[in-house]
Amino acid sequence: MSRIYAPVDEPTLEQIDQDAKEKGISRAQWVSTAIESILHQEGGNIENLRLELEQARTEREETWRELVQLRRTQEQSSTDIEQLRSKLTKLQEDKSLMEADLARCKEELERCKVEKEKITEAMKLKEGEIDFLRGHVSQLTQSISQLSLPPSQEEAKKKHWWSFWRG
C-alpha cells in the first residue's frame, strides 16, 4: 500500500481527529475511508452527470424539433392569415358592390312603382274615354235607327227618286 502526505490546517485536523474518535478508527483509516468515499461518489457523480447530460441533450433536441415545428406552424398560420385577409378584403369589396347594386335596384324599383302608377292612371283615363265613346256610339246607333226610312222609301232611294216617278 502507498502513502500520501498532504498538509492540513489545525481546525481541519481537529475535525478529522474528533470524527475518527467518534467512529473508533485511526486517523489513517479515517482519511482512507474519506478518499474512497469521495472517489466512489465522484465516479457515481460522473456517471450521473453523463446520464443527466445525455438526458439534457435529448430534451434539447426534442425542444429544438418542437421549436422548428412551431416555427413552421407559425409560418403556415401567417400564410393562412394573409390568405384570409385577402379573402376578407375581396368579400368586403364584393359586399360594397352588392350594397351599391342593392341601392341602385331599390331606386329603380321606386321609379318603376311611380311609372306603374302613372301607367295605371293613364289606363284608367283611357278606359273612361272608351266607356264614354261606347256610350256615345250607342246613343248614335239609337238615333240612326230612329231616323232610318221605312222599307218602301228605301226602295225608292235605291231606284233614285226620279226612277220612282216613272214607274
Image (cartoon, helix red, strand yellow):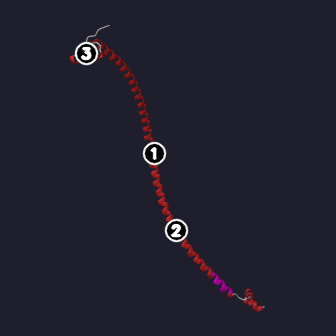
| Place of residue 154 in the rendered image (x, y in percent of width and height, measured from the top left) | 73, 87
Which residues are the magenta region?
137-145
The kind of residue tagged 2 is: Glu
- Callout 1–callout 3 Cβ contact below 8 Å: no
Residue 3 lies left or right of residue 79; in this view the side is left
Dot in front, 1 or 3: 3
Residue 87, horizontal then vertical, whole percent: 46, 47
Name, please, the residue furthest toward the right.
167
Foreground: 43 or 130?
A: 43
At 45% across and 52% down in the image, what residue appears? 93
Q: Residue furthest top?
A: 1
Badge 3: residue crowd in 10 Å (few <14, some 14–19, many ≥20)? some
Identify the amino acid type marked 1: Leu
Q: Circle 3 sits in a helix, a strand or a loop, which is it?
A: helix
Report which residue position mark 3 lands on: 17
* Mark 2 touches mark 3? (CB < 8 Å): no
Query: Which quarter shows the C terminus?
Result: bottom right
Magenta run includes residue 26: no
At label 3, the amino acid type is Asp
Residue 140 placement: quadrant: bottom right
